[in-house]
Amino acid sequence: MKLASQSQLSSWLPSIHPQVWIFAIGRFLSEVGTGFTLFYAPIFFVNQLGLSATSVGVALGSASISGIVGRIAGGSLADSEYWGRRRTLLLATAISAIASLVLATTNNFTSLVIGSLISGLGIGFYWPAAEAVVADASQIDNRRETFAIARLADNLGLAIGIVLAGFLIAIIGSYRWLFVIDAISFMVFFGVVYVGISEAEQQQIEESEKTELFAAWMAVLKDGRFLVYIAVNIFFTIYISQIHSTLPLYFKNFVFVESSAKGFAETTISGLFAWHLVFAIICQLPVTSILKRCSHTLALTVSAISGQLVSV
């Protein structure tokens, strides 16, 4: 059994495009920085700055508004032969680094909203281009494994960042440095993309095959199955957003430890979320291998049901 699994693993690992490995390294380094802020930002803004949980939720939620704009613009730029995936990624990482520095200097609700809007814009530009880079560098028969490698790098970096952030806060007690480290990680990611990522050759399109931008968007919005997927994805991401924003603050301010009559320490919170990601890291490749035999629809159904069972 063990030898068979090793043989299966080695059979598709060599077929992963080298650019995917380079991009995965960049994503890993960037997610380490993201792990420093993702779960601790609400705690910092509520407990350190004295903002209400509601206002922090509104401010952080505003990133979704600019994120919609960023995803629409980013998707169009990534597909453009005049701009492309690489430049879109460089723009996204630069914007995200600026956003982290703005959040590091935040002292009130207004600056928090500004930083969140900039952050959402950077994230919006990032994801269409990032997913396109992985898809461009993969083949149909190993596309799921290629995406699994990218997500594995994300989860591994995020887990390490969360743990390191918990220890850093326990030592120096300053949350602002977390955002500075996040900004540095985005600048490192910028360097990885600039040096190691090349533009996809498949973007060379014949003049007769070009489609007007407006017509392309209309074609997408008329796809009934895609619209159903969007609706389902909205509900699923609501659950994910609660884990990232509300749950850490709940553990810190509303779940009290009997021995101290205080909320969980930062190191405890980091440990809880890190173990969640460690489990995802362990299961990432085996689950991908198992679900490869299934259709995309069935795989998404299994994922949604699993997430619902865990939340219950």
Image (spheres, rainbow, N blue to C red):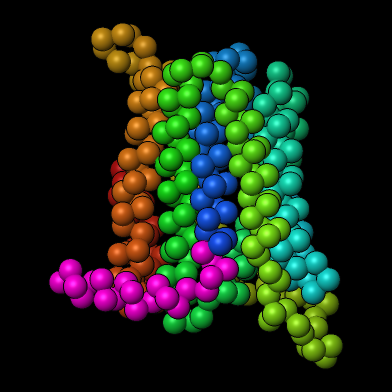
Q: Position of residue 217 (x, y in %)?
A: 74, 70
Left-right relation of 197 to 98 = left
Q: Position of residue 204 (x, y in %)?
A: 76, 83
The answer to whether residue 307 of the structure is visible from this angle is yes
Viewer-nearest residue: 221 or 279? 279
As for residue 9 lying within the magenta part, the answer is yes
The answer to which quarter of the image holds residue 198 is: bottom right
The residue positioned 69% from the left and 80% from the top of the image is: 201
Left-right relation of 174 to 115 = left
The residue positioned 51% from the left and 50% from the top of the image is: 28
Viewer-nearest residue: 286 or 186? 186
Q: How many marks?
A: 0
The answer to which quarter of the image holds residue 112 is: top right
For residue 176, above or below residue 24: above
Query: Where are the magenta residues, as a range?
Result: 1-21
Q: Position of residue 43 (x, y in %)?
A: 52, 23
Left-right relation of 308 to 84 = left
The answer to whether residue 235 of the structure is visible from this angle is no
For residue 78, above or below residue 164: below
Which residue occupies the extreme front position in the image? 195
As for residue 18 lying within the magenta part, the answer is yes
Q: Position of residue 164 (x, y in %)?
A: 45, 32
Considering the whole magenta stretch, tell me its main secondary structure: helix
The residue positioned 55% from the left and 53% from the top of the image is: 27
Left-right relation of 174 to 108 = left
Viewer-nearest residue: 20 or 81? 20
Classify the position of the N terminus by image quarter. Answer: bottom left
Which residue occupies the extreme top position in the image? 260
